[in-house]
């Protein structure tokens, strides 16, 4: 595999970040409602808007001259508010053609290292209950379930069964 580089997102990465988020989401739809063209359009639109001004710490992974994965951390209690601890991994997306190569683990570690540098005590991540592959990754990395329930997704406009996992760091 080509060399991987990890860095904070730059302006030149915005389209690649939106593309990877969208194609990864398309490849990992876990609920029948997610196949609705209106839902697909909402997700694509949200990602294009998100990358214009992400109010989070966003790390990209590049290979072969393009973004192939990215992760972001933010405040769990006050999303987008940099005055609150950025202890929440809000996003982790890998291009489907690059999945299974350790990029997700590496991005997760990059984000946790940044949390440690900020002297945070724990990392949190929330995931769709049906995303078993991601849940397996997080558990292998030492995360443990702390909450299970349903939250309304503003992006999808749908209720979404979720898990919250935490890890001391």
Image: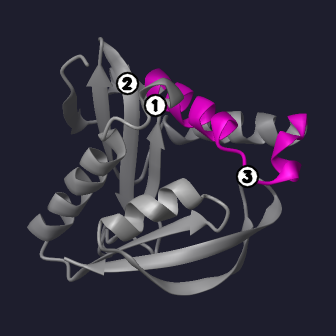
Task: Give the residue number, with chain letter if any, for mark 1.
Answer: 17
What residue is drawn where x is 87% and y is 50%?
Answer: 32
What kind of element bears circle 2? strand
Task: Please tell me whether mark 1 sits on a helix, a strand or a loop.
Answer: helix
Instruction: Please name whichever residue, 135 or 15, is drawn nearer the observer in this view of the structure.
Output: 135
* Quadrant location, the C terminus: bottom left
Q: Is residue 6 magenta?
A: no
The answer to whether the residue labelled 2 contacts the one labelled 1, judged by CB atoms less than 8 Å apart, is: yes
Relative placement, left or right, of 112 versus 45 is left
Choose the circle earlier in sequence order: 2 or 3: 3
Which residue does the image show at 29% across and 12% down from the upper left? Answer: 65
Q: Is residue 134 visible?
A: yes
Where is residue 108 shown, x and y percent of the image?
Answer: 30, 54
The disc placed on residue 67 is 2
- For the N terminus, the image quarter is top left
For mark 3, does the 10 Å Cα neighbourhood hold few (<14), some (14 to 19), or many (20 or more) residues? some
> Which range is magenta?
15-37
Q: Which residue is mark 3?
A: 30
Q: CA distance from mark 2 to mark 3?
A: 24 Å
Question: What label sits on residue 86 in the rendered view?
Answer: none
Coordinates of residue 19 in the picture (x, y in percent): 55, 25
Distance CA(mark 3)–CA(mark 1):
21 Å
Expressed as whole percent of the image width and height from the top left, the position of residue 45 reads 69, 35
What residue occupies the far bottom of the structure in this picture? 146
Task: Give the vertical position of 93 relative to 149 (above or below).
Answer: above
The label nearer to you, 2 versus 3, is: 3
């Amino acid at each position: 595999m080509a060399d991987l580089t990890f860095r904070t997102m730059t302006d030149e990465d915005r389209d690649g970040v939106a593309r990877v988020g969208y194609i990864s989401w398309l490849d990992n739809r876990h609920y029948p409602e997610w196949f609705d063209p209106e839902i697909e359009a909402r997700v694509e639109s949200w990602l294009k808007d998100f990358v214009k001004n992400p109010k989070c710490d966003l790390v990209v992974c590049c290979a072969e001259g393009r973004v192939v994965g990215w992760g972001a951390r933010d405040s769990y209690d006050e999303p987008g508010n940099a005055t609150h601890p950025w202890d929440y991994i809000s996003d982790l997306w890998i291009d489907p053609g690059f999945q299974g190569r350790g990029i997700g683990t590496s991005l997760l570690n990059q984000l946790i290292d940044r949390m440690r540098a900020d002297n945070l005590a724990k990392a949190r991540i929330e995931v769709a209950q049906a995303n078993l592959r991601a849940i397996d990754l997080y558990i292998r990395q030492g995360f443990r379930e702390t909450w299970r329930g349903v939250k309304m997704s503003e992006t999808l406009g749908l209720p979404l069964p979720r898990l919250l996992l935490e890890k001391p760091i």
